[in-house]
Image (cartoon, rainbow, N blue to C red):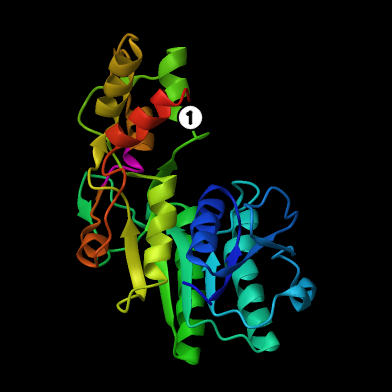
């Protein structure tokens, strides 16, 4: 990526991890945040609120690649739409007005765009019928990016990431440690995840390969049954395994909302290799580091 001018819009966990490897590649990297403090070394700060189109005049010139990895500041629908749809549109319009035409663009989307609830396998060709607003907003944002890229004749990829974990993201560890983790009887609940470093490397990969474009599923090699993850973590930490509780219809419907198995076959076939191919490698490193 040497010589590229790459704008990373949103430097949270994934965006910051990506920015670090892009700087190491020799690229000029710009980190866009409302308050661009705590950026990785070598990243040039860009203080812009994506929700304010008037601030787009502060965008850097000559951007050759764009990564949109921003996050909403709340889980409300209007907050999602303000960043993922309107904010993305503001940014794309601002880049166009400045004369920048990024040859590669990547949007970090979510496997929440899939609505399957019966443990089905899903990939880039599967139906996208999300039950909630978050998945619908992500699909709308994907369409905004694809339409803009089509008009410009450039490559745009939407990387549909599973649950992101890694250093500092200790929710499952905390549930097991505190004894609050429970396993609902009545059949498997499949979960899909990706380590933050692999998520960043997958974005970098899509900025480099010839076949970039369209939708990509960003999950590790192994969809994992939720209780298998809990049990493995408990065993590694020397704690009791979570209790099994009877299935309750209301609780089960909530669990089924994310019950699917996501395939990374396209990403693998493009040459990408995971540092953490399953939750075991990733969580083992976290536990060894004291997370």
Report the side of 92 relative to 222 (left or right): right
Image point (42%, 64%), residue name: 204
The answer to which of 25 and 69 lies nearer the viewer is 25
Rendering quarter of residue 209: bottom left
Q: Is residue 110 visible?
A: no
Q: Nearest the camera: 60 or 28?
A: 28
Q: Most extreme residue toward the right, as rendered?
A: 54
Is 258 magenta? The answer is: yes
Q: Main secondary structure of the magenta part?
A: loop
- Where 80 sits versus 62, above or below? above
Instruction: Depth check: give the residue in front, 69 or 111.
Output: 69
Element at badge 1? loop
Res 176 quadrant in image: top left
Task: Give x and y (percent) for residue 150.
Answer: 44, 87
Q: Residue at x 28, y 60 (%)?
A: 272
Residue that mark 1 sits on: 170
What residue sits 32% from the left and 8% below the top? 240
Q: Is residue 268 left or right of residue 210?
A: left
Q: What is the total number of numbered labels drawn onto the structure image?
A: 1
**The residue stretch that appears in magenta:** 256-260
């Amino acid at each position: 990526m040497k010589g590229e001018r790459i704008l990373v819009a949103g430097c949270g966990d994934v965006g910051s991890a990506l920015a670090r490897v892009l700087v190491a590649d020799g690229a000029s990297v710009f980190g866009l945040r409302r308050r661009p403090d705590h950026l990785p070394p070598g990243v040039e700060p860009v203080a812009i609120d994506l929700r304010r189109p008037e601030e787009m005049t502060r965008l850097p010139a000559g951007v050759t690649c764009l990564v949109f990895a921003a996050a909403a500041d709340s889980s409300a629908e209007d907050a999602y739409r303000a960043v993922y749809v309107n904010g993305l549109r503001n940014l794309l319009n601002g880049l166009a007005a400045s004369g920048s035409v990024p040859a590669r663009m990547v949007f970090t989307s979510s496997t929440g765009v899939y609505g399957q609830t019966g443990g089905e396998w899903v990939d880039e060709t599967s139906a996208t019928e999300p039950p909630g607003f978050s998945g619908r907003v992500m699909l709308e944002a994907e369409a905004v990016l694809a339409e803009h890229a089509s008009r410009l004749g450039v490559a745009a990829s939407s990387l549909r990431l599973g649950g992101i974990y890694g250093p500092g993201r200790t929710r499952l560890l905390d549930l097991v440690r505190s004894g609050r983790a429970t396993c609902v009887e009545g059949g498997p609940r499949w979960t899909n995840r990706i380590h933050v470093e692999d998520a960043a490397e997958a974005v970098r990969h899509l900025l480099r390969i010839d076949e970039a474009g369209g939708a990509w599923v960003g999950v590790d090699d192994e969809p994992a049954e939720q209780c298998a993850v809990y049990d493995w973590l408990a065993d590694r930490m020397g704690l009791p395994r979570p209790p099994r509780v009877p299935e309750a219809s209301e609780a089960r419907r909530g669990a089924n909302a994310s019950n699917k198995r996501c395939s990374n076959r396209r990403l693998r076939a493009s040459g990408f290799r995971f540092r953490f191919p399953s939750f075991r490698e990733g969580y083992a490193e976290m536990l060894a580091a004291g997370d």
